[in-house]
């Protein structure tokens, strides 16, 4: 069993990320069992700018993950460059918990961009009406929640309830094809799963 302790910034992600990770488990590593813990919810500005909070939440996640687990930080990139900003945050995090596997993924520009990458498969879900010509660049929209709300006639996108529900229905292969930041999450999944499996096989060989 591989434990994943995650850190997220939104109430919607607290519910949605476990749904997404369980689906990734089935899609990418069906032969391995991942124990996906409820995410730790942080305020992004405080988490990134107040060292005491940054250290406290990372140390909590590291404790929850355990020796053979994995710490995943998932934040929205907003207007930042995911590569540049991500490298800085990950470097800081590794200094705090050098004894743990740790990954940092910045959804570009928001978690909801991954819904837009699979928009045509979500039409009819949660009141969404997606037109045939709705094929925007999912990572080029600033205001993904607003984009979704505009496509819910007489309604509005609600992060806490709609985000986990829509996560259950996105086409993962389609999102992987269209979203670089989602491919980053998948790459981290593959890398961490392979590393943990290799370590376990090595430990098993040494015991024989």
Image (cartoon, rainbow, N blue to C red):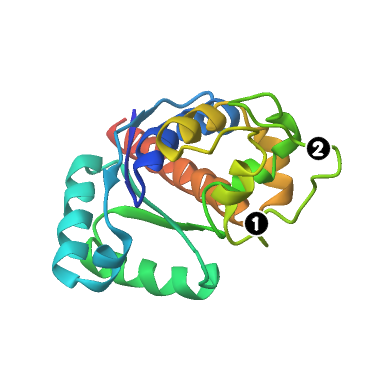
Does dot 1 land on a helix, a strand or a loop?
A: helix
The residue indicated by pointer 2 is 131
Depth order, front residue of 91/32: 91
Task: Kindly report the distance in space between the C-alpha atoms of the residues bearing marks 2 and 1.
Answer: 24 Å
Residue 150 can be seen in this image: yes
* 151 lies left or right of 77: right
Q: Residue at 29% x, 65% y: name it.
A: 93
First reached walking from the N terminus: tag 2 or tag 1: 2
The residue indicated by pointer 1 is 180
Q: Residues within 10 Å of mark 1 (few under 14, many from 20)?
A: some
Q: Residue at 22% x, 56% y: name it.
A: 58
Q: Are marks 2 and 1 in contact (CB under 8 Å)?
A: no
Q: Where is residue 152 in the image (x, y as percent from the top left)?
A: 63, 35
Q: Residue at 31% x, 30% y: name it.
A: 208
Q: In this picture, is 2 found above or below 117?
A: above
Does dot 2 land on a helix, a strand or a loop?
A: loop
Q: Residue at 15% x, 58% y: name it.
A: 56
Q: In this picture, is 197 found above or below 53?
A: above
């Amino acid at each position: 069993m591989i434990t994943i302790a995650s850190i997220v910034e939104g109430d919607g992600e607290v519910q949605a990320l476990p749904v997404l990770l369980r689906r990734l488990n089935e899609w990418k590593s069906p032969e391995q069992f991942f124990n996906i813990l409820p995410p730790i919810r942080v305020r992004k500005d405080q988490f990134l700018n107040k060292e005491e909070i940054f250290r406290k939440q990372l140390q909590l996640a590291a404790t929850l993950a355990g020796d053979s687990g994995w710490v995943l930080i998932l934040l929205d990139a907003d207007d930042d460059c995911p590569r540049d900003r991500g490298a800085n945050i990950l470097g800081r995090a590794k200094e705090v918990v050098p004894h743990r596997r740790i990954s940092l993924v910045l959804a570009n520009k928001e978690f909801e961009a991954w819904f837009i990458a699979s928009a045509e498969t979500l039409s009819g879900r949660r009141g969404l009406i997606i037109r045939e010509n709705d094929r925007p660049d999912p990572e080029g929209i600033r205001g993904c929640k607003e984009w979704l709300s505009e496509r819910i006639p007489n309604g509005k996108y609600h992060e806490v309830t709609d985000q986990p529900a829509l996560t259950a229905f996105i086409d993962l292969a389609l999102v992987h094809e269209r979203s670089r930041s989602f491919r980053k999450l998948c790459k981290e999944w593959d890398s961490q799963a392979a590393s943990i499996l290799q370590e376990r096989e090595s430990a098993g060989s040494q015991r024989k």
